[in-house]
Image (cartoon, helix red, strand yellow):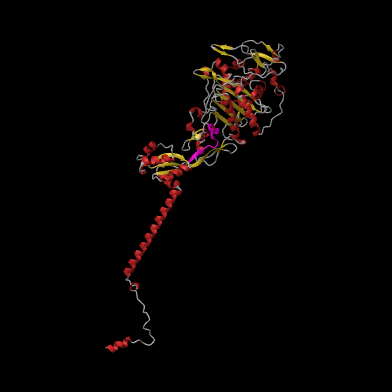
Amino acid sequence: MKNWLRRKQRPQPGFDIRQPQPVIDPMAIEPELSGVQSRVLETSHNRLMLGAGLFGVAFLVITVRLAMVTLLPQEADAAVAHKSGVAPVADRADIIDRNGVVLATSLTTASLFANPSQIRDPDDTAERLNMVLPDLNIASTAAKLDTDKTFIWLKRNLTPKQQDGVNRLGIPGLYFQMETKRIYPQGSLTSHVVGFTDVDSRGLAGVERSFDDLLSGGQRPLQLSIDIRIQHIVHEEVSRAIADFNGIGGVGVVTDIKTGEVLSLVSLPDFDPTDPGKADADTRFNRATLGVFEMGSVFKIFNTAIALDSKTCKISDGFDASKPIKISRFTISDFHGKNRWLSVPEIFTYSSNIGSAKMADAFGAEVQQSYLAKLGLLDKSPIELPEVGMPMYPAAKNWKRINTMTVSYGHGVSVSPFQLVTAMSATINKGLLITPTILKRTANEVPDGHRVVSEKTSTAIRQLMRLVTLVGTGKLANTPGYQVGGKTGTADKEKGGRYSENANLASFLAAFPMDDPKYAILVMVDEPKGNQKSHGYATGGWVSAPAVGSIVERMAPLMGISPMPVLPPEEENPLVALVPDYDSPASKKSNSLVMQVKATGDAESKSVAAEPAAPGAPLEAE
């Protein structure tokens, strides 16, 4: 047995007993699995891969969500806002002037709202919000947040810096809704024309209200007839007149006589349309279209046109203005009157109330009312603004003789300043009234207009208005080379049921060039006070006429109007022969060139002029 063992241990030839033998790992040996075991293992493997995939998708969703909340909070909050019933505000169309300058546009802003049910600590949230938004009252904000509601507005139209500050607070339950905020690049310059919107971009005043439906959700800009260059000039000159004469307000209007387009409409004081709530009612009040006033002697334009067109008098006729008119308890007198017979051109140029009243008495109340109605002075202006005033005048049955007389010089009937411009334009536009508009018109869109007076009457009125700036009460508006014509107006304001001697409206209603009028201009200053330069006077000739002259001088080159050669008054206007300057020493000589002819009755007389009087010293403006 031992020998056998020894033989077994004896090395075999070629075999090295020192060679290491391989070690077999029993765990590495894959056992053969049965079919059931294989299926179980495969199922477990699939479930593991599915779980890993779902976990990866969830992680990706969370990552994207965090990115949205951090980088695009408006997208993240949109769903919350939608669930709360807050609809995003649609884009609102721009408003531009006739040359494409933007007057109103919309910017996208973030508005802050909260879901109070998600706010854990209302007091702490209110205090932290106040650090970013100081205008949020802590107590009232906390009270809003401490409710069972699911939606409350906290602040609308945040700045980007404010939005970022709220985001950095990281308070759950605060969200943003992206909205549009109305911006007015021209500021207060066009506030009474363009108007303003509320926080939800709904038009509340001006063009914003008139064309709210068109602007809401619109893509095409709304183009106005306003020329922002002219608007700036008018705004500046009216502001200067108000400041120089310490007025409480004023109006400036420029229109295109041929097309009816409004190039400028200024009412002062004005306001910031982005924050109209800070303006008081008087500041927001549109004096140009909503205010109705007794406008004074500018009405003599219409009175004279009625007299000539109704053929109750001729341009060469005259009336006795030697003494005041007394009817019952009323007395009609002239401011620095001539106390003599006056020709029709003299009545107009010297602005005689007595002569105008007798002229109106000749054609009567019915004719007066008929013409005023045709001129659009007895109804609201059709201008496309919501702020339009209704004229005030006596009922037909109460329109007595005294009313007819006082209306002749602008008392007893109240109209808006803008209506005056439209009516005056008709009297000098060959007698055709063009419907005014605040929108830009193409050549094909200009209406034909309807006749209110004859062309002959229109020509006479143009000559009379030119007389006022050549030798009459409006000489301070005369701009050499541009043939400015106009009419002064100074009307006492009614206060406490009676006319005030210390409060008036000073106006100058004008047009140029008078050989073929293209532009109409009105400047009115409310309650001006005389100064040293005006020798204490606060009348239309001193207050408003110079402003009109400055407007013409500045706007004419912009509109492509070149100055014309300046002629002597007698050569330029034949009616100068009927208006000798009775304030000059030469005219007061006994050999006056005006021959007075006595006529029967107390209403009419004839006045004949032989030759032009020698020019004298400037007339004192009314």
Region in magenta:
180-192
The vertical placement of 358 against 72, above or below, is: above
Picture quadrant where residue 557 is located: top right
The vertical placement of 252 against 329, above or below, is: below
Left or right of 305: which side holds 93?
left
Q: Quadrant of the N terminus?
A: bottom left
The vertical placement of 60 against 478, above or below, is: below
Q: Position of residue 593 (x, y in %)?
A: 71, 14
Q: Position of residue 306 (x, y in %)?
A: 61, 20
Residue 82 visible, this orientation: no
Q: Residue 190 lies in magenta, yes or no?
A: yes
Count of numbered labels shown in the rendering: 0
Q: Position of residue 457 (x, y in %)?
A: 65, 23
Q: Residue 594 lies in magenta, yes or no?
A: no
Q: Nearer the viewer, residue 511 or 538?
A: 538
Q: Position of residue 521 (x, y in %)?
A: 61, 28
The vertical placement of 79 against 334, above or below, is: below
Residue occupying the far left of the picture: 1
Left or right of 1: which side holds 360?
right
Left or right of 58: which side holds 217?
right
Q: Nearer the viewer, residue 346 or 545?
A: 545
Residue 208 visible, this orientation: yes
Picture quadrant where residue 345 is located: top right
Picture quadrant where residue 97 is located: top right
Q: Quadrant of the C terminus?
A: top right
Residue occupying the far front of the picture: 18
Q: Nearer the viewer, residue 326 or 267?
A: 267
